[in-house]
Amino acid sequence: LVSLENVSVYFKSERNPREQVGALVGVNLSIEPGEIIAVVGESGCGKTTLGKVITDIYQPTEGRVLYKGKELRKLTKQEYKEYRLGVQMIHQDSYAALNPNRTIFQSLSLPLLQHRLAHNQHDAWDQLSELFVEIGLTPPAQFLQKYPHQLSGGQRQRILLARALSVKPTLIVADEPVSMVDVSLRISLLDLMARANQKLGVSFVYITHDLGTARYIAHHGRIAVMYLGRMVEINQIQAALDHPAHPYFHALISAVPEADPTLRGERLTQLPLRSFDMPSVTNAPPGCKFHPRCPYAQEICEREEPKLREFEGGLVACHLAESIRAGMNGRFSTSS
Ligand code: SF4
């Protein structure tokens, strides 16, 4: 559906405008029709930039983005319009994503009328009412007539999902859609997205730093793990969680607190740091970007950046994936 080929996005550094900072570097990713792919990583790893490249909010500095096999910049006007409607984004901050001066109906009917998906205001009202019932915003009139500030965070997030679904998309990029929503409402929002995937075949790129919700929504799909603007592991989510190949992903999984008092926290892993500064895209180290924190790092890791390559049915960017797997028998250790 959408493919990224060797995509890099560089921004000017705030400290030194002549310096370029790689927010995304050499990213390859293909999103298939009907799939859910979870993109995970720490804050600042490039997840949101990736989402904005997929939706053409940011254009790549290098590389290309294809929609149904055709480069975005070479689409005809009609094809580009189809892409803009077909690929929607749900933002993290539902308040900022809705115009505070418009009622929900005014905001949501606009794209329907502009793109002639509704004949008139009455038709738009009927279509949106039907959608609101499906996603549990009932009675619809009560929500359509309100302003964003009159709704809760969970209701606004549902409305953003309704706005994305109303134009009948093929792909939705959901950027941390439940991180600002009460924990008790998260599952119902994730279920709505999963239902849209199953019933309507909508693909999802689910961007998060939370492995729990990633696993919940993408349990039959794939996971893509990012670190400092690079993809470091891509695999089926269950296989990746059972046998993570990249030391960073292994550490991420180990750092998830267990709701099991018998564990007394021994599964929690703190990543070591050999230098004082936490690596970020603005001070990315040479070679493997993870080497200052990696307990397995060797000389080659400091020198050469590993490429994403095939490993055990998935893809991993690590020079030593085989020997780590063999030597540690799949277990992670921070003792080295
Ligand atoms: Fe660690 Fe080296 Fe693999 Fe990077 S390439 S993750 S530093 S072992």
Image (spheres, helix red, strand yellow):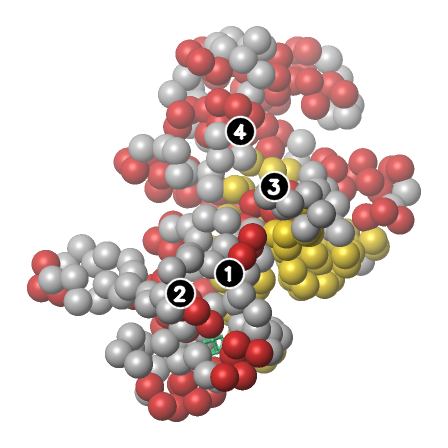
Q: Residues within 10 Å of mark 4 (few under 14, many from 20)?
A: many
Q: CA distance from mark 2 to mark 1?
A: 17 Å
Q: Residue at x 30, y 37 (%)?
A: 183
Q: CA distance from mark 1 to mark 3?
A: 21 Å
Q: What is the x, y in percent for residue 260? A: 14, 59
Query: Considering the image in quadrants, where does the C terminus appear?
Result: bottom left
Name the amino acid type tagged 4. Answer: Leu
Q: Is residue 325 left or right of residue 168?
A: left
Residue 160: assigned label: 4
Residue 86 showing in the rendered view = no
Q: CA distance from mark 4 to mark 2?
A: 42 Å
Q: What is the x, y in percent for residue 148? A: 48, 15
Secondary structure of residue under mark 3:
loop
Residue 275: assigned label: 2
Q: Residues within 10 Å of mark 1 (few under 14, many from 20)?
A: many
Q: Residue at x 53, y 29 (%)?
A: 160
Q: Residue at x 17, y 67 (%)?
A: 266
Secondary structure of residue under mark 1:
strand
User: Sequence order check: which comes first, mark 4 or mark 2?
Assistant: 4
Residue found farthest to the left = 262
Label 3–label 4 contact, CB within 8 A = no
Query: Considering the image in quadrants, where does the N terminus appear?
Result: bottom right
On screen, residue 93 above or below 3: above
Q: Is residue 306 left or right of residue 335?
A: right
Q: Which image quarter: residue 110?
A: top right
Secondary structure of residue under mark 4:
helix
Name the amino acid type tagged 2. Answer: Ser
Residue 227: assigned label: 1
Q: Residue at x 74, y 37 (%)?
A: 84
Nearer-the-camera pick, 317 or 241: 317
User: Sequence order check: which comes first, mark 4 or mark 1?
Assistant: 4
